[in-house]
Amino acid sequence: MSPRHPRPWHWGRTEARLSSSLQPPRGMPSVRPAQLLRRPGALQAGLARGLGLPPVPVRTRSFSLHCAPCSSRRQPVWGPGAGFSAAGGGPQPQIKGRLERPVQTGAQQPRKPACARPSRRLRRPCENVTMAKAPRAETFVFLDLEATGLPSVDPEIAEISLFAVHRSSLENPERDESGAPVLPRVLDKLTLCMSPEHPFTAKASEITGLSSEGLARCRKAGFDGAVVRTLQAFLSRQEGPVCLVAHNGFDYDFPLLRTELWRLGAHLPQDTVCLDTLPALRSLDRAHSHGTRAQGRKGYSLGSLFRRYFQAEPSAAHSAEGDVHTLLLVFLHRAAELLTWADEQALSWAQVEPMYVPHDGPGLEA
């Protein structure tokens, strides 16, 4: 006859002996043997606590919690450095975003979280990660890029456009006779075209109207040090901190711009933050709809948003300046909500990783 329990008979006796030997003194928290056996760093501390001995120091190593998937694989462990106090005074709350693991000696070293390993491609920052609160932006720079293709072909920037608007103009937007918002009278604009080293894909050339031949015929230089200095001078004229705003920016515009700047060893001001209006508007609508199905059927492309808000077609779509013009009007339509979202959810520019690693290393060109 098969045993009633699948585990060996002596396990129960072993746990019973452990339970009797690990009963803590009165007033101290009880420890389950199964918990100790499953947690390598806690066995020493549990034995010491249960037998009334001084706590055994356990060296621990910290790593940053990057995203929710990694946190599910890196559960907290119980021990002096993780769950119990060194004096055995009971469970201690974990520091949010930090986990403690015992240092393993020998060949078995703790593996890094998957999102901390070098990756050639950037994935959108996890929405569940608690970031440090970004500074309140005083100037919002709306930007759009036109490039040689999708991320899969390691694209290069061929056109960039930026509109810089002060926060006061967004908090009190100007409106026409019908009540629709119009562009602020005071704003700075910058639009640059540049000739990429690699050709456009056929689809990108069809959508943007740009081509390597046309840019070369107009004697346009590539994304070089002169472009970087122009961008830095443009941003330095604005009251900081600056918030870069792009539609689908976390998946395309921000990583690609970071790649081009990284290739030249250039940086933006440290207090620069980023706002992606695509996930922001989706989240705002989801909150208003209370999870109804009607919200899921809405389109969130820039053109769809403009048609829904203004009942008109956007002008000069798929040119960098035309898309920034459309983006700014869409932002003005939901300005109060998006400003609040930016104050609470904006991501630091330092946390944006390059879209890919360029072949030529960093170094500012003339």
Image: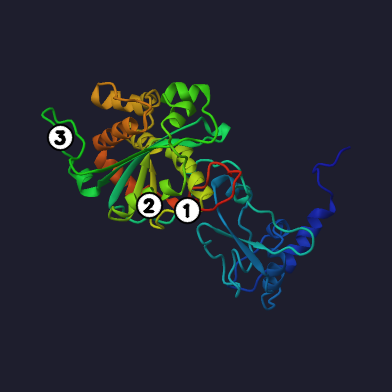
Question: Which structural element holds mark 2?
Answer: helix
Out of 275 and 188, give the one closest to the viewer: 188
Mark 1 residue type: Ala
Q: Is residue 145 visible?
A: yes
Instruction: Find residue 16 and report its horizontal and vertical position in percent.
Output: 76, 60
Residue at the spot 64% in from the left edge and 64% down from the top edge = 61
Q: Quadrant of residue 253?
A: top left
Q: Which residue is mark 1?
A: 266
- Coordinates of residue 257 in the picture (x, y in percent): 46, 43
Instruction: Write the residue at 42% across / 53% down.
Output: 268
Residue underneath mark 3: 175
Q: Quadrant of the N terminus?
A: top right
Classify residue 169 by image quadrant: top left
Badge number at residue 232: 2
Residue 346 appears in view: no
Q: Secondary structure at mark 1?
A: loop
- Which amino acid type is marked by label 3? Arg
Q: Are marks 1 and 2 in contact (CB under 8 Å)?
A: yes
Q: Position of residue 156 (x, y in %)?
A: 50, 37
Residue 178, quarter of picture: top left
Cα separation between marks 1 and 2: 9 Å
SS state under label 3: loop
Question: Closer to the observer: label 1 or label 3?
Answer: 1
Foreground residue, 5 or 103? Answer: 103
Q: Residue at x 38, y 34 (%)?
A: 282
Residue 11 position in % (x across, y down): 81, 54
User: Which one is earlier in the sequence, the residue at label 1 or at label 2?
Assistant: 2
Total number of numbered discs in the rendering:
3
Question: Left or right: where does residue 233 sit relative to residue 123?
Answer: left
